[in-house]
Image: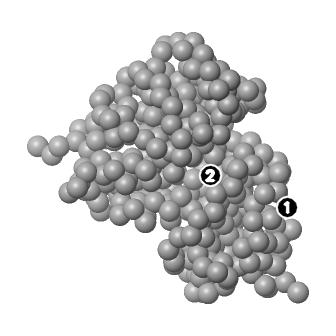
């Protein structure tokens, strides 16, 4: 008998810090264990996957929207390839912050995987600061992520006021059914103990709320970076829009110009792993908070912007080209 693979979903709304949390878990990986990560991004350029690969895990990306759409085929294909390649002891799955978890859980516990995967607690990260925004509390994706979770984790508590943390605790305590555990953390720091146990698989509020984004054809992102050194891709769905770039690593960008774009208040998210004039940088902006850290060289630069309104891809492309010194 083949031992089922311990599996956990790490959920959370856009910009809550899921990738940072998974990076922290990977740093705690027990010696000798093989871990794998299936990561799904709303955008098309795979920045989260590029960051996770640095921690020695096997990573498989499903870019371009909710992984469980189109009868779950994108997820099943990626999952099967990852299991075959990695033969992991543990599997972490990071769905897009704009996705619905119900069909993912249904797939993971269905007949194809019931003897392959051992689904443990579903963990949902929440930024307590965003609970004051009714647009977040009433968002169907947010509600479904919370409802599907076994463990709620208040992240970024270092940036929260005592009142915001108290409000989170009150909100979490009022949830019905209640959660197995509620925790506080900052900087995405997680406990390995949270990954153990059996998921209770609670119902979600809108299990079929996929609508027309299930029929969107995936973008063609397979172009060779040597043949096409500047690749621009776009995506839209779930009430959000994205523009992303894949750029040849020999093209260096001005860091200050890039950060000026990153702090545009109209953007919901800015993510990048990019070759700048002074070296490689990983840039992350969410809710007006920016993180810029030096990182190791990659096979290409990747940039992604996400907004709740339509984006002018041509104007944004001109800004990024100017940062690369390609515009007079």
Q: Is residue 299 left or right of residue 133?
A: left
> Residue 166: image x %, image y %?
62, 21
Q: Nearer the viewer, residue 87 or 170?
A: 170
Q: CA distance from mark 1 to mark 2?
A: 18 Å
Q: Which mark is residue 145?
A: none
Q: Secondary structure at mark 2?
A: loop
Q: Residue at x 20, y 57 (%)?
A: 32
In the picture of the structure, the residue carrying the numbered disc 2 is: 42
Location of residue 106 by image quarter: top left
**Which part of the image, by quadrant, shows the C terminus?**
bottom right
Q: Position of residue 237 (x, y in %)?
A: 70, 46
Whether residue 101 is visible here, answered yes or no, is: no
- Residue at 42% x, 33% y: name it: 122
- Of all residues, the one furthest to the left in this rendering is 1
The part of the image, by quadrant, that contains residue 181 is: top left
Left or right for 44, reference 28: right
* Residue picked out by circle 1: 312
Check disc 1 and report its element: helix, strand or loop: loop
Q: Residues within 10 Å of mark 1 (few under 14, many from 20)?
A: few
Examine the rendered structure and indicate whether residue 177 appears above or below residue 8: above
């Amino acid at each position: 008998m083949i031992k089922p693979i311990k599996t956990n979903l790490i959920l959370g709304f856009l910009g809550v810090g899921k990738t940072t949390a998974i990076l922290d878990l990977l740093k705690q990986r027990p010696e000798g264990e093989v871990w794998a990560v299936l990561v799904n991004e709303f955008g098309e350029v795979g920045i989260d996957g590029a960051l996770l690969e640095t921690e020695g895990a096997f990573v498989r990306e499903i870019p371009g929207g909710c992984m469980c759409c189109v009868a779950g085929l994108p997820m099943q294909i990626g999952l099967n390839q990852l299991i075959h390649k990695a033969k992991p002891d543990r599997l972490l799955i990071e769905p897009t912050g704009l996705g619905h978890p119900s069909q993912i859980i249904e797939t993971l516990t269905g007949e194809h995987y019931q003897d392959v995967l051992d689904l443990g607690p579903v963990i949902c990260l929440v930024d307590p600061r965003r609970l004051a925004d009714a647009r977040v509390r009433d968002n169907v994706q947010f509600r479904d992520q919370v409802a599907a979770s076994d463990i709620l984790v208040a992240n970024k508590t270092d940036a929260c006021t005592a009142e915001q943390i108290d409000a989170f605790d009150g909100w979490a305590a009022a949830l019905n059914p209640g959660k197995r555990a509620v925790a506080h953390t900052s900087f995405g720091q997680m406990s390995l103990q949270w990954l153990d146990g059996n998921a209770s698989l609670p119902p979600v509020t809108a299990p079929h709320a996929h609508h027309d984004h299930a029929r969107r054809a995936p973008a063609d992102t397979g172009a060779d970076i040597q043949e096409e050194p500047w690749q621009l891709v776009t995506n839209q769905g779930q009430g959000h829009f994205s523009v992303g770039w894949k750029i040849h690593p020999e093209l260096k960008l001005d860091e200050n110009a890039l950060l000026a774009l990153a702090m545009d208040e109209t953007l919901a998210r800015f993510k990048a792993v990019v070759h700048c004039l002074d070296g490689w940088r990983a840039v992350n902006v969410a809710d007006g908070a920016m993180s810029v850290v030096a990182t190791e060289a990659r096979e290409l630069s990747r940039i992604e912007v996400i907004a709740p309104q339509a984006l002018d891809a041509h104007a944004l492309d001109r800004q990024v080209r100017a940062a690369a010194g390609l515009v007079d």
